[in-house]
Image: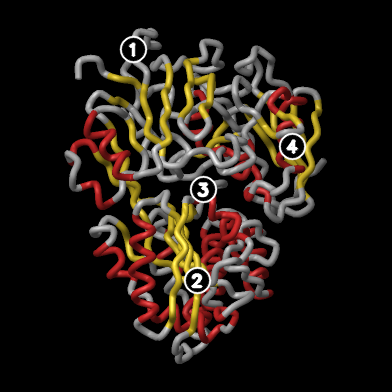
Amino acid sequence: MTTPARLTTRRLLPLAATPLALALLAGCASPSGAGAADDSGDRVSLAMLQPPRSGLSPLSDDAFKLSRWATAETLVVLDADGEALPALATEWEQVDDTTWRFTIRPGVHFHDGDELTSATVVNALQHAIDASPLPRILDGVDMTVAADGDDVIITTADYDPLLPHRLSSPQLAILDEDAYADGGVDPVGTGTGPFELIEVDGIVGATLDRFDGYWGEAAQSSGIDVKFVPDGTARAAALRTGEADVVEAIPAGQAATIDEDLITEVPMPRTNTLYLNSETGPFADPAVRAAAREAIDRAAIVASVYEGRADVAEGLLGPALPWAAGHRQQDTYQETLEGRAEPAEVDGVKITLGTFTDRAELPEVAVMIEQQLEAVGFDVQQDVREYQFIEADALDGVFDAFILSRATVLDSGDPVAYLASDFTCEGGFSISQLCEPQVDESIRAASATDAGDERQRAIMLAEAEILAADAVVPLLHERVIQGEAPRVTDAARDPRERILVTTDTRLDAAQ
């Protein structure tokens, strides 16, 4: 089949001895000649932020735990610049506008001993396509998959210039056929990564051992011991006391209690946002939404709650995407914002405000937002719970306002999937219940634009349309604060929160 002239057919070659490019985001390489560690006590202990919400199903946000533990792998991975690299697929090409061919890596075995084939890849992807709710990376994507010898053919209904990037999402991880049953998806013993998931203890923890049959370079650590520690103070204490080697998401308020040599700050593609219910209740009125927007003092929240360890939000996309700020200066962007509604005068307007406790700062943010809203005439009733007990209500539009810490390029390395999921009429994560034809059209246009400057410009015009609707108030962009004990070497510091332990991660016995 002839490739249309406007397409660039691209074939990527295998990465020699670089399994899944896992070390690319770690920031350093293994010492020359380093081999796999023995099993005599070099296991890495992790203190993780959130327990599983969906039984560690890769079709949910739990997929990112499986990715951070290097147990479930995808066809494609992204490097630090967001470029697609081979993983379980060694190469691919775009056959025509809507058809792609992926060659599956030979010699790969699942943790249960079965061989990776094109058929098992198709089975895994088909389960994602058929899942309900749909993995958000597939929101708005009509995709079919079929095996063709050692290759997998993926066809989309519409032109999708970022399909390889899309396949890097941990929610499209490839597990063995035995993982998929009527009752859900079980990742225990069914991945392909350098670490095998051996046991999951509910919301308490998990155990992983090095997989000696791994297709790439052997892991240097003999295993990973995970504890789920939702309380931020307890996570910080685990680092100080040596109970954990690597600690996720240390709260900004706890950072001052820890030796600066043990913590690292990384600007995150993560925005803390106040979502306003634009469908029902007081915020169905654009003028009332505008009043809330004008009431919020972002800088005060950053200075007080985050002690300056965050960036004030000028929009949905922050400094982790350095191109975003420049595009906000374009005339069309500014003209769109000028179309916002004028703020209404409010006097005793009752609203419910929800958030969750899993991120320690958010209840404090809720207190400040309540004060700021009440200062202009709102009457605020808070509802704060653990995320697993509040997410369903937030998605169902139970709250008038909801504070969420949201990754903006978590899935494809591109923010369009996030915009489509959160702000389109058919979006699967639409807490603001927004449904505006102009917003939908702007996101559709960005999705159809090829990668590069023009796509970035289209993305920012979509951001402007979303902000003009006042269904969300971006508050701040987080910086992840990751803790690492002195004996830890080569833990990944990944802004996308996909990678944490790699084949290179190990403990230095001399420390």
> At 44% from the left edge and 75% from the top edge, which residue is drawn?
380
**Earlier along the polypeptide chain: callout 3 or callout 2?**
2
**Earlier along the polypeptide chain: callout 1 or callout 2?**
1
**Earlier along the polypeptide chain: callout 1 or callout 4?**
1
C-alpha separation, residue under disc 4 versus residue under disc 2: 37 Å
Q: Given the image, on which type of amino acid does mark 3 rest?
A: Leu
Quarter of the image where the C terminus is located: top left
C-alpha separation, residue under disc 1 versus residue under disc 2: 50 Å
**Earlier along the polypeptide chain: callout 1 or callout 3?**
1
Secondary structure category for the residue under label 2: strand
Query: Of all residues shown, which one is farthest toward the bottom?
Result: 345
Residue 33 lies, in percent from the top left, at 34, 11
C-alpha separation, residue under disc 3 versus residue under disc 2: 28 Å
Question: Across the whole image, how many numbered discs are drawn on residues?
Answer: 4
> At 43% from the left edge and 53% from the top edge, which residue is drawn?
269
Residue underneath mark 4: 127
Residue underneath mark 3: 410
Discs 1/4, front: 1
Residue underneath mark 2: 352
Quarter of the image where the N terminus is located: top right
Q: Which quadrant of the figure has residue 193?
A: top right
Discs 4/3, front: 4
Categorize mark 1 by other alpha carbons within 10 Å: few (<14), some (14-19), many (20+): few
Q: Given the image, on which type of amino acid does mark 4 rest?
A: His
